Image (cartoon, rainbow, N blue to C red):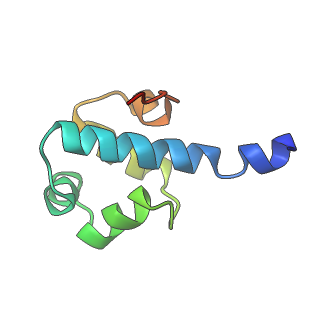
Amino acid sequence: MGTDKHQSGEARRRIAVNVRRLRMERGLSQEGMAELANFHRTYVSQLERCVTNISIDGLERLAMALGVDVTELLEDKIISS
C-alpha cells in the first residue's frame, strides 16, 4: 500500500469523522449544526460524507459553532467500540 493513496483525502476524512462525532456529542442535527455555523444543511451532510472540501474560513466557523479549537477538527482519533 503506497503512502500517496493513504494520504490522499486523509484530512477530509478526519474532518468528516470529527465534525460528525462532535455534532452528535452535542446533540445537534445537521440542520442545527448548519445554522450555528451559517451553512446550508446539505453542505454539512456533504462534509460528513467527504463529498466536498472546506475552506480554512469554513473550518473556523465549524470550530466556533462546536466550541472547539480548529485543530481538533483535524485530529486523528481512533474510535474503539
Say above or below: 20 vs 46.
Answer: above
Residue depicted at 49% across the width and 29% down the height: 75
64 relative position to 16: left or right: left
Nearer to me, 67 or 5: 5
Nearer to me, 39 or 47: 47
Res 34 quadrant in image: bottom left
Nearer to me, 19 or 63: 19
Residue 24 appears in the picture as rendered = yes
Residue 13 is situated, as x and y percent measured from the top left of the image, at 54, 48
70 relative position to 53: left or right: left
Which residue sits furthest front?
81
Res 6 quadrant in image: top right
Residue depicted at 43% across the width and 30% down the height: 79
Residue depicted at 23% across the width and 38% down the height: 66
Residue 24 is situated, as x and y percent measured from the top left of the image, at 21, 44
The image quadrant where one finds the N terminus is top right
Residue depicted at 55% across the width and 50% down the height: 12
Number of residue marks: 0
Residue 67 is situated, as x and y percent measured from the top left of the image, at 22, 32
Residue 40 appears in the picture as rendered = no
54 relative position to 65: left or right: right
Say above or below: 51 vs 66.
Answer: below
Residue 76 is situated, as x and y percent measured from the top left of the image, at 52, 30
Say above or below: 62 vs 72.
Answer: below
